[in-house]
Image (cartoon, rainbow, N blue to C red):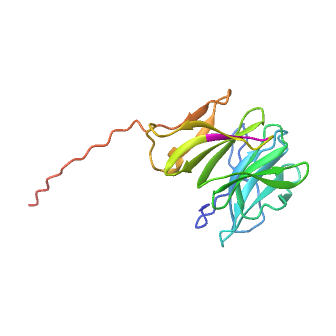
Amino acid sequence: MDMGLSHPWKNSLISLGGGGPEFLVQDGTEGAEADPTWTPNGESIVFGKSDKTGSVAIYQLDLKTRNVSSIPGSEGIMSPRVSPDGRYISALTSGQAKLMLFDMHTNHWSSLMDGEWISFNEWSHDSKYIYVRQIRAGGGEVVRVRIKDHTVENVLSFKNFPQLGDDAATWIGLTPDDAPLLMRDRSVQEIYALDLRFR
């Protein structure tokens, strides 16, 4: 995952009252930071970070003390999302072929599912499921994984759903009642001929 290493991405905080952005991590390193996610109590932020070699890991920032600590065993794991109940972190392996789950009570990682390409891990509002977009056998789909037994359920196929090929356009999200939100390609593409006359 390219996290902007030529111009490293940095997480920042902006006051509701306005003003300039305040960089959260001031450790002087050149690593890129991405995917910040709040803990439910609003006291810390969990985020991914990469270094010049492309190695990734997950960290937690205490907003009061500004102390940054690594999430144990998170080397090679990225795209963290904290569950709404604060119990878990879902994340992806750096090759995006595996969905991982970190239990913040036991400090233990487990694998939830394998796939060809998994992205946009999103928690259900009751913290019982993780929804992801995956590519399988050349086709895209949204599936959800049940936390208690790791059962994978199909939610939606993209077979007849036009989407742009760009990474940002493949984003998925969830409504307050956990219905999938998608970006649909409604653009029109046409071919034109242009005659040039030189004087």
Q: Which residues are magenta?
A: 143-147
Q: Is residue 144 left or right of residue 166?
A: right
The image quadrant where one finds the C terminus is bottom left
Kindly indicate the quadrant of the structure image that contains residue 92.
bottom right
Outermost left residue: 199
Q: Is residue 198 magenta?
A: no
Q: Residue at x 21, y 47 (%)?
A: 192
Q: Nearer the viewer, residue 182 or 196?
A: 182
Q: Main secondary structure of the magenta part?
A: strand
Q: Please tell me how many numbered marks the rendered image carries.
A: 0
- Position of residue 34 measured from the top left corner of the image (x, y, whole percent): 67, 55
Q: Residue at x 33, y 39 (%)?
A: 188
- Position of residue 26 measured from the top left corner of the image (x, y, whole percent): 77, 61
Q: Residue at x 59, y 40 (%)?
A: 142
Q: Residue at x 73, y 38 (%)?
A: 129
- Position of residue 22 measured from the top left corner of the image (x, y, whole percent): 73, 51
The image quadrant where one finds the N terminus is bottom right
